[in-house]
Amino acid sequence: QVQLQESGPGLVKPSETLSLTCSVSGDSISSNYWSWIRQPPGKGLEWIGYIYYSGSTYYNPSLQSRVTISVDTSKNQFSLRLSSVTAADSAVYYCAREGIYYDSIFFDFWGQGTLVTVSS
Amino acid sequence: AIRMTQSPSSLSASTGDRVTITCRASQGISSYLAWYQQKPGKAPKLLMYAASTLQSGVPSRFSGSGSGTDFTLTISCLQSEDFATYYCQQYDSYPRTFGQGTKVEIK
């Protein structure tokens, strides 16, 4: 069974950089696509971006200037960095696998999520 | 980006009711649509993909239909464990986008 687990600080100061890591077990990160998705309290889901094991990435244009997603295949992990954060970046952050099934690619496994609050 | 619009935003229903949620894409997405169920404090759970294919382990009371721009999720006989928020999501193109969610509450 594929499992994902987010880790990182739960509190980040405004203007600083949010950093999270997703550890993957039960699957090699050298397959499928790996994404970050966030959900502000009481609101809907926003896709942040993905990384492929080769290092290729695609970011949501709404966040592109502040986002970096990287992968460490030796540790079977991928990471998110979001710079210059404000209170609007406070959210539960999920990592997810975008599984490839024939011509369909969708989020089939999710981490439990980690709440990040931006506050001084 | 493709905009996904769900309706209604919330609904009240009783156990045993038939419930239908609609999702509309701002442009055609063929059948590249997934549905997720989310309960409070939990991650979303995949229910369906390719608009109408049930994910393994999901009860058959859930069904989906549609293609192009208009889609529906139907729960044929609502059970207590089905009270949750439901999201549609397109995977036709990046950036991936979700509907705003439909909260199914107990009447």
Image (tube, coloured by chain):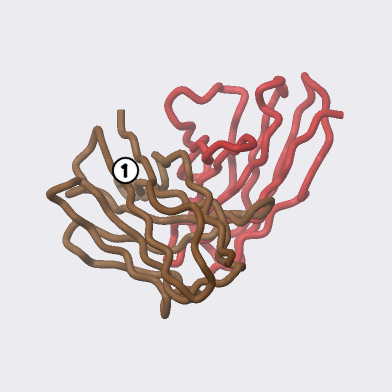
Chain colours: A brown, B red
The N terminus of chain A, quarter of image: top left
* Residue sitting nearer the eye, A53 or B97: A53
- Disc 1 residue type? Tyr
Tag 1 subunit: A
Label 1 environment density (alpha carbons within 10 Å; few <14, some 14–19, many ≥20): few
- Please tell me which residue is depicted at 24% across the width and 49% down the height of the picture: A77
> Which of the 4 image quarters holds residue B3?
bottom right
Side of B17 relative to A90 (left or right): right
* Residue sitting nearer the eye, A78 or B107: A78
Q: Position of residue B53 (x, y in %)?
A: 47, 36
Q: Position of residue B56 (x, y in %)?
A: 42, 26
Total marks shown come to 1
- Please tell me which residue is depicted at 39% across the width and 70% down the height of the picture: A59
Q: Residue furthest left?
A: A74
Q: Is residue B104 above or below residue A93?
A: above
Q: Position of residue A4 (x, y in %)?
A: 35, 40
> Which of the 4 image quarters holds residue A99?
top left
> Which of the 4 image quarters holds residue A83?
bottom left
Q: Residue furthest front?
A: A120
- Please tell me which residue is depicted at 62% across the width and 35% down the height of the picture: B39
- Please tell me which residue is depicted at 59% across the width and 64% down the height of the picture: A119
Side of A100 relative to A55 (left or right): right
The C terminus of chain A, quarter of image: bottom right
Q: Which residue is mark 1?
A: A101
Q: Position of residue B102 (x, y in %)?
A: 71, 45
Question: Which type of secondary structure does the marked residue at label 1 adopt?
Answer: strand
Side of A65 relative to A45 (left or right): left
